[in-house]
Amino acid sequence: MEAVTVIGAGLAGCEAAWQLAQRGIPVSLREMKPEKMTPAHHTPWFGELVCSNSLRSDQLENAVGLLKEELRRLGSLILSCADEHRVEAGGALAVDRHGFAQAVTRHICSHPLITVIRGEVTALPPQGPVIVASGPLTSQPLSQAIGALFPEGRYLHFFDAAAPLVSFESVDMDCAFFASRYDRGTPDYINCPLTEQEYDAFWEQLCTAQQAPVHGFEDKQVFEGCMPVEVMARRGKQTLCYGPLKPRGLRDPKTGAEPFAVVQLRRDNAEGSIYNLVGFQTHLKWPEQKRVFSMIPALKNAEFVRYGVMHQNTYLDSPRLLDRYYCFKAQPRIMFAGQITGVEGYVESTASGLLCALELSRRLADRPPLDLPQETATGALALYISNESVTDFQPMNINFGIIPPLDCRVKGKRNKNAALSKRALEALEQALS
């Protein structure tokens, strides 16, 4: 059987390669690291998490929690590795990023039907099935090759940012406390409270701090789901207090009251030696990050083991270009998966790679498509990115808004979401039977 070429060993590419190989289909997996690195990558491992180490909520009352459960039931390699290397994060699924990436790399490289070829890909294969999962940081030569497929210029971009990391031993725990919001799960987050006076001083400096030069950047070009903290701050003095610094459900044990604002730190590795600043994606200059973030009392002597960075993300105008199987309509042998399709988030990227491979494997075996229904999160995501009625296409996380509503009334948002998830998992089982 002819090998399928998969370009990119990120979450989507590794998931696609694994699913194909598990179905007896040989795969040629192309990856440019470590010969060539992107501005956001730091290791040679596959499935590297370049921003947060959190895969977000693991609860079925949340749409991404539903998507994770669907992926588990579909035999996802990425979810299996994530579950194996999870670190405590309340109701979220967070992972030791190095342990996770090493596990993904080990599974991929040891599979007998996957051949890994290192080096930059500068052109698409002239024939045979190919899945392009090169990610939002696709190198310029390959980006130009992809762009040549679309003479109408349907290749878009936005700017994305990553949060800084600090060492645990440098956090002043006399000014912080462990807790999870509303006491859900174990007390895994380090909470750094600020008084109103401390917050006002921090906010003023954050709004005026010097930004690193990013060619072509304007505030309006950022992705709403991964907005730099300084851009969010400039939207209003209280914006952060309703966003990443909201104190709701967190009581300072020293006072018994909710602080005016709280900066949360989430464990970034299994040892608990490194923590990331939750919601603090940024593109401030590095000395400015040190100066401004050290104004947070618990971080006054913080050791920053990695500063925040910002980079341009590229994605397709998928509703005009792709079908629900992530196939390029004009040349169905070419498929796309991951954030380059306009799905946003680690789990969503994984889902696109998995579904892409499932449908391709069925096509290669002359079987009818699976056609996961819109009632499932996986199916809804594929139908969203291929919906031609979407005119102003923007990258999107999975949400219950793109899943059809229930045909009966359910009281309470959490109960309604739980019912949507129950229906989705039943629909998935029926589609697979």
Image (spheres, rainbow, N blue to C red):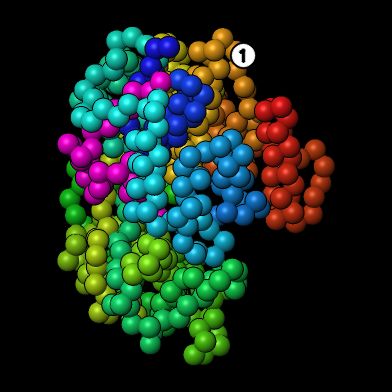
At 54% across and 21% down in the image, what residue appears? 359
Q: Quick one: 100 or 393, which is closer to the camera?
A: 100
Q: Quadrant of residue 57?
A: bottom right
At 34% across and 48% down in the image, what residue appears? 102
Give x and y (percent) for residue 204: 30, 71
Vertical position of residue 412 compared to residue 115: above or below: below
Give the residues drawn in magenta, as a range: 26-54
Mark 1 neighbour class, 10 Å CA radius: few under 14, some 14 to 19, many 20 or more: few
Q: Quick one: 129 or 412, which is closer to the camera?
A: 129
Residue 90 in view here: yes
Q: Quick one: 396 or 216, which is closer to the camera?
A: 396
Q: Quadrant of residue 249?
A: bottom right
Q: Quadrant of the C terminus?
A: top right
Residue 317 in view here: no
**Which residue is denoted by mark 1 in the rendering?**
368
At 73% across and 37% down in the image, what residue appears? 426
Q: Amino acid at mark 1?
A: Pro
Vertical position of residue 400 compared to residue 372: above or below: below
Give x and y (percent) for residue 63: 60, 46
Q: Quadrant of residue 411?
A: bottom right
